[in-house]
Image: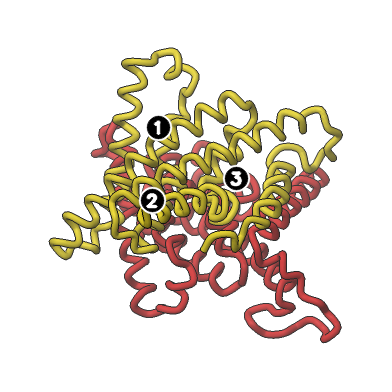
Amino acid sequence: MDTLNILIMGFISIVIVNNLVFTKFLGICPYLGVSGRIDMAFGMGMAVTFVVTLSGTLTWMIDHWVLMELGLEVTRYVCFILVIAGAVQLVEMYVRKFFPALYESFGIFLPLITTNCAILGLCLFINLWEIDNLLEAVVLSFGAGVGFTMAICIMAGIRENLNLADVPDCLKGAPITLITAGILALAFMGFAGMIR
Amino acid sequence: MASDTKAGGGLYKQTLLAGLWRENPVFRLLLGMCPTLAVTAAVKPALTMGLSVIFVLLCSNIVVSAMRNFLKPHLRILMFTLTIATFVTIADLFLKAFQPEMSETLGPYVPLIIVNCIIICRAEACASKNGLVVSVIDALGMGVGFTLTLCVLAGIRELLSTGKIFEVPVMPDAFVPWAAMSMPVGAFITLGLLLGLVNVVSKRKS
């Protein structure tokens, strides 16, 4: 019961209170780039959720069972980035084989997930928070993906309406998106202190 | 980059200046947004971050430029990433050893330089196509441009959130600090407004 409690709290915390986009500034590049249309945003969110769950779990296992056992913590970053690149490659191959239509619509964004800082960032945060339980690492990774999907979908919804709004010329595009993100971050600050 | 326009001294100068304004990584190319937003609550961490990025960018550009003729196209990105990860590890260990406080403040954002788009973009767009000298100059221009941008943003945020710059008080006593500027909100909105300002200035120039 206690473990379940920790897991649920951890999940809510990473999705809402410690949302990677709004409080840790991770994954801003795709956040600005792909949030133009809501279906694309949702697809991107799904792909990121899958990759982040897979690589968060794998890096935790490698970190705890191989690197710490052998005292090779120095190579941690190199190993992490290799695992992430491998996971993205795997997802790309799988999607291309079984969902060709989805693969077409993702285009360049699929390989670009490798350089999405939300993924490496989450692996590093799991390491930093000293999570010593595999199950918790899996739940946190999955929650991070859900949080990212939520953030990018909210943004895409707002931007679709923003197209009809009268925005000053110099603020069109990225600037107004950033300002909107700021206001969203302010809203999400209301959740701060709810858990941990 | 500007390699096909002119040769000689003019080219070097042009490459160097490109990073500072015309192709400024943050304002113009919208690259490296995560560290830009995350470490700019105060000038000191921003400066440390900028210097680390210059170091990694310089080293990785040198290595990539030196091995550009041996690279297989499909293994290119992997090799770039591994090179960058190695130098980032060096920078991280250096900070941990000599600047432990700063390392604590920056936290995971130092290892996150690995996925900073600026570095991989310069490796791909410049270093893998140009000679050593151009790559070094390009790295310096881009790195300094990035650092200056970080410092401007951090300066504004630190001034408004604490009334200090470089931890030296500069505002009159009556100034009430804007706490929000040191939070994520301040980062997003300040950067958004700065980008708008840059758009206005460059439109007036042209």
Mark 3 crowdedness (10 Å alpha carbons): few <14, some 14-19, many ≥20: some
In the figure, is residue B204 to the left or right of B53? right
Label drawn at residue B171: none
Q: Position of residue B80 (x, y in %)?
A: 33, 45
> In the rendered image, which residue does mark 3 sit on?
B30
Kindly identify the amino acid type of the residue bearing the numbered disc 3.
Leu
Q: Are callouts 3 and 2 both on one chain?
A: no
Q: For numbered disc 2, what is the local secondary structure?
A: helix
> In the rendered image, which residue does mark 1 sit on?
A111
Q: Position of residue A115 (x, y in %)?
A: 42, 42
Q: Position of residue B56 (x, y in %)?
A: 40, 59
Q: Vertical placement of B63 versus B109: above or below?
A: above
Q: In which quarter of the image is residue B47?
A: bottom right
Q: Which residue lies furthest to the left in this view?
A: A70
Q: Which residue does the image show at 44% across and 36% down from the upper left?
A: A48
In the figure, is residue B109 to the left or right of A89? right
Question: What color is chain B drawn in?
Answer: red
Q: Vertical placement of A107 versus A49: above or below?
A: above
**Would residue B10 be seen by someone viewing this image from the given angle?**
no
Label drawn at residue A4: 2
Q: Vertical placement of A59 versus B100: above or below?
A: above
**Would residue A9 be seen by someone viewing this image from the given angle?**
yes
Q: Which of marks 3 and 2 is in front?
A: 2
Kindly identify the amino acid type of the residue bearing the numbered disc 2.
Leu
Q: Where is residue B20 in the image (x, y as percent from the top left)?
A: 61, 55
Q: For numbered disc 3, what is the local secondary structure?
A: loop
Chain to which mark 1 belongs: A
Chain rendered yellow: A
What distance separates the C-alpha of mark 3 from that of mark 2? 41 Å
In the figure, is residue B114 to the left or right of B105? left
